[in-house]
Image: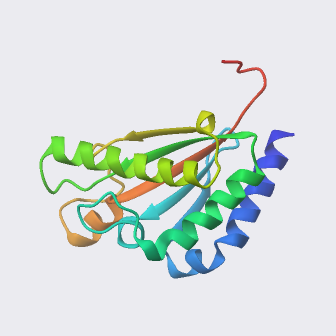
Amino acid sequence: GVGAYMDKQKKELEKTLAPERTAGTIQIESLPQNALRVTMTEQTAFAMDSAEIKPRFHSTMDKIANVLNRYGKTELTIIGHTDSTGTTQHNQALSESRAQGVRNYFLNKGVISQRLESQGLGESAPRASNANAEGRLLNRRVEIVIEPVVADQAG
């Protein structure tokens, strides 16, 4: 069923992104309800205060898009996050722009738009303290939440 499908997709993502995972530039984790989360760090995907995906990260994005295209029974929510440096309004806009940038990249690689949603959470969902540089670095990220399309959720 759904669990096996998502496990297979996770294994394929892990295999495909093994070099990035070893280097610490991508994290892949399982979430409840058979969902997956792929986290891209700011140091690899974006320049400081920029929503443009770094050219050297395009090959990683291509790998993710290829797996997403092979597993079409999933929906993706792309979520941008920032640290607390700068104004709340600026961080919210930057997080939205980064999430939209990843969404647009996937659209250009053939992932259908109905599967893609993007949102920015700005500085509202830190995963580390913003009091030091290491924490701020962890908070600057884009997460791709991959969820199975379940037939009984017609919409």
In what quadrant of the picture does the C terminus appear?
top right
> What residue is rendered at 30% in x and 67% in y?
137
Residue 60 place in picture, x, y as percent: 56, 70
Residue 127 spot, x, y in % from top left: 36, 55
Q: Quadrant of residue 59?
A: bottom right
What x and y, as percent, mark residue 15? 72, 72
* Left or right, 14 with reference to 50: right
Please count the marks in the image: 0
Residue positioned most to the right: 1
Occupied quadrant, residue 93: top left
| Residue lying at 69% horizontally and 63% vertically, measured from the top left | 13
Q: Nearer the viewer, residue 83 or 67?
A: 67
Relative to 59, does residue 127 appear above or below in the rendering?
A: above
**Percent position (x, y) of residue 78?**
49, 46
Q: Is residue 123 visible?
A: no
Question: 141 or 57: which is nearer to us?
Answer: 57
Q: Residue at x 87, y 40 (%)?
A: 1
Q: Report the side of 113 relative to 45 (left or right).
A: right
Seen in the picture, residue 103 relative to 41 is either above or below; the reply is above
Q: Residue at x 51, y 55 (%)?
A: 105
Image position of 97 (left or right of 87)? right
The image's colour scheme reads rainbow
Residue 141: tell me if it is visible: yes
